[in-house]
Image (cartoon, rainbow, N blue to C red):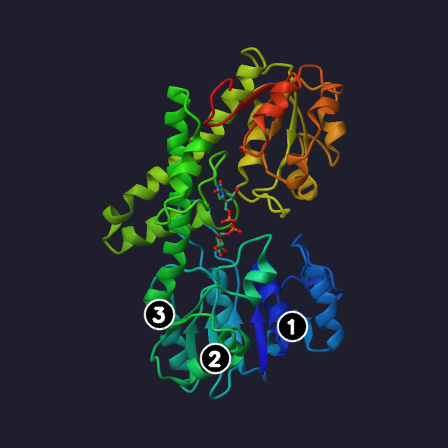
Amino acid sequence: MRISVIGCGYLGAVHATCMAKLGHEVVGIDVDGAKVAALSSGRAPFYEPGLNDLLAETLGTGRLRFSTEISAAAGSAVHFVAVGTPQKRTENGADLSHVHASVEALIPHLRAGDVVVGKSTVPVGTARDLSKRIAEQCPSAALAWNPEFLREGFAVRDTLEPDRLVYGLDDTNSGARLILDEVYAQALAEGRPRLLMDYETAELVKVSANAFLATKISFINAMAEVCEATGADVSMLADAIGHDARIGRKFLNAGLGFGGGCLPKDIRAFMARAGELGADQALTFLREVDSINMRRRSRMVDLAREVCGGSLLGQRIAVLGLAFKPNSDDVRDSPALSVAAQLQLQGAAVTASDPEAVPNAMRRFPDLTYTESVEEAVQNADAVLVLTEWEHYRSLDPQFLKTLVRRPAIVDGRNCLDPVAWRDAGWTYRALGRPRAA
Ligand code: UGA
């Protein structure tokens, strides 16, 4: 099948590459020439495990190419729209300008029977509007809404082996459904669930899934606040409640909270859209989800101040982790980077390190001192803060690191270290939601 993917950011670049892996003939289109050049030479402009290898493989087959020209979409039967929908600058709603601009640019290249497939995360109602616009301009083309649920760090696997496929359709018996079935033939043959629904439900599935995940994280972080007030241990609590299959242990890791390019902006855009629809009361709880999440960052700064003896002024703080989560170089709305910047603003001298995210962090906050090496970061530190749970940090040797620091004090912002091992090695170990000492 001939496929175009419009927008080669995180979602689009992964989607285009994976579609080519499935045997389709794919063109990825983006207005950013540097991005297109990088992808064409087999280098993703962001870090995603496994993606560069897959890019090289699929470019090598000749089934994948990238272009800056929207006219390259002509001749494809399916056109995925995977452009960004960032938060508006001055309010909480989503900025849909890229979605509208790409659909308008695509319309002159559509042929009878083509299917435009929305992948971007959009406010409910967007697909219905776009389908009217396409019907006016090219009545024989169709629109489907097919939200994406991939996670950064697992993007290739999540795309090739989705846990469900959601098709939002104007008519569930339409040709668009058959074409999507052909695109996803492999996943369907593997028995992966395919759910057919109207546009509005499909759009809502995406944002409500992210809202639920954000709520789950803020729930456990709210429990962490209570644990801190009583001397209880939120990790033990999460393990214990997580054994109940109705609750489940996943997404119950208390710590610095959620960040990234999706969860924070999606819950805000969801609230804004509910407000426009007169259903704002239904989502007021998400405001609390957002505030609990932001409070974790201030609590982390407070804990750092505490282990530094009450003042951050002139203290040397080593920050381990800057990405919003491990296996990513993404620092968009990263709790780790925001804490690092706050500490520096409050007078600490921060040396920050991350295995992948240093270049992106440096662009956002040039004022911090950066290094990729843990050993350099912790040199003469008064406190060490673990803010992203990279696997590498879990296996750090507390005995060895103790020889490098000025004061052996560590704050575990992601509850990813073994408190006993660090305390036994003579460190002051503090963590969000866990008691001062065992
Ligand atoms: C999220 C969703 O998980 C994907 O299903 C969705 O497709 C994607 O957004 C999207 O809308 O595109 P992602 O942003 O890659 O994926 O990251 P998550 O794995 O969901 O993590 C989000 C944040 O929550 C991270 O900052 C992570 O550290 C934090 N988190 C996660 C916790 O604080 N505790 C947990 O238990 C789990």
Q: Position of residue 283 (x, y in %)?
A: 29, 47
Q: Amino acid at mark 2?
A: Asp
Taking the spot 57% from the left edge, 43% from the top edge, the residue there is 325
Badge 1 vs badge 2, beta-carbon distance below 8 Å? no
Q: In the picture shown, does residue 5 fall above or below 181?
A: above
Q: Quadrant of residue 379?
A: top right
Taking the spot 37% from the left edge, 66% from the top edge, the residue there is 202
Badge 2 vs badge 3, beta-carbon distance below 8 Å? no
Q: Is residue 427 left or right of residue 78?
A: right
Marks 2, 3: nearer the viewer: 2
- Can residue 106 be seen? yes
Q: Is residue 9 left or right of residue 225?
A: right
The answer to which of 434 and 153 lies nearer the viewer is 434
The answer to which of 322 and 49 lies nearer the viewer is 49
Q: CA distance from mark 1 to mark 2?
A: 16 Å
On the image, numbered disc 3 is attached to which residue?
199
Q: Determine whether the beta carbon of the residue marked 2 sits less than 8 angstroms from the nearest atom of ligand 1.
A: no
On the image, numbered disc 1 is attached to which residue?
21
Q: Earlier in the sequence, mark 1 or mark 2?
A: 1
- Can residue 9 be seen? no
Q: Is residue 372 left or right of residue 248?
A: right
The answer to which of 162 and 38 lies nearer the viewer is 162
